[in-house]
Image: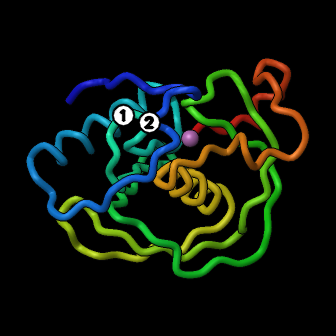
Amino acid sequence: MAIRNIREIGDAVLNKKCKEVKEVTPRVKELIGDMLETMYEACGVGLAAPQVGVLKRIVVIDVTGEDPYVMINPRILEMSGEQTGHEGCLSVPGKSGVVTRPNYVKAVAYNENMELYEVEATELLARAICHELDHLEGKLYVDKVEGPLMNVEDLEDDEEIED
Ligand code: NI
């Protein structure tokens, strides 16, 4: 596995729609391993393939630091409620902004073995799923921010979320 270079806002790859994964080839497995390693190394809670320059519908998420979700071709089936809070992105370093997201999300995705599974998520995990799935559509949270985009150094530590 290897750490990959994280693309930053302004890089055109972050604004492109990603393609479905048809098969988990050795190359896709390597990509997933690299995405996990890159996410942990950057202390993020999620990472989408376009953030490492690959336009495939793959995201990795770990909001607990010990139990990663690998989501291939993920789709949201249901969402409800609302949460408003700070969000950040490894592709927008040093910044944070307030975004409103659903408080509950039910999603379906394939794992690394191309087995379909469902995730029911609330709070931070629901936020991370929405944020990462937006990346697959070429969207960044900065377009959904309510109020100003702030510098992380001006915030309290517990308000930081990087994904
Ligand atoms: Ni992000």
Q: Confirm or reject: label 1 Cβ below 8 Å from ligand 1.
A: no
What is the three-letter code of the residue carrying label 2?
Val
Query: Percent position (x, y) of residue 14?
Result: 49, 38
What is the three-letter code of the residue carrying label 1?
Gly
Query: Percent position (x, y) of residue 114?
Result: 20, 68
Disc ID at residue 13:
2
Query: Percent position (x, y) of residue 159?
Result: 78, 37
User: Which quadrant is the N terminus positioned in?
Assistant: top left
Which residue is more in the foreground, 115 or 58?
A: 58
Give the image quarter of residue 53: top left
Q: Quadrant of ligand 1?
A: top right
Q: Secondary structure at mark 1?
A: loop
Give the image quarter of residue 2: top left
**Decide: marks 1, 2 in contact (CB < 8 A)?**
yes
At 40% across and 49% down in the image, what residue appears? 60
Q: Earlier in the sequence, mark 1 or mark 2?
A: 2
Residue assigned mark 1: 53
User: Which quadrant is the C terminus positioned in?
Assistant: top right
Q: Secondary structure at mark 2?
A: helix
CA separation in Å, label 1 and label 2 = 6 Å
At 23% across and 73% down in the image, what residue appears? 115
Give the image quarter of residue 38: top left
Which label lies toward us, 1 or 2?
2
In this view, the residue farthest toward the bottom is 78
User: Residue 121 vs residue 59: left or right?
Assistant: right
Residue 141, placed above or below residue 83: above
Q: How is the image coloured?
A: rainbow
Which residue is more in the foreground, 29 or 57?
A: 57
Which residue is more in the foreground, 48 or 154?
A: 48
Residue 34, placed above or below residue 60: above
User: Residue 130 vs residue 68: left or right?
Assistant: right
Neighbor class of circle 1 (other Cα within 10 Å; few <14, some 14-19, many 20+) is some
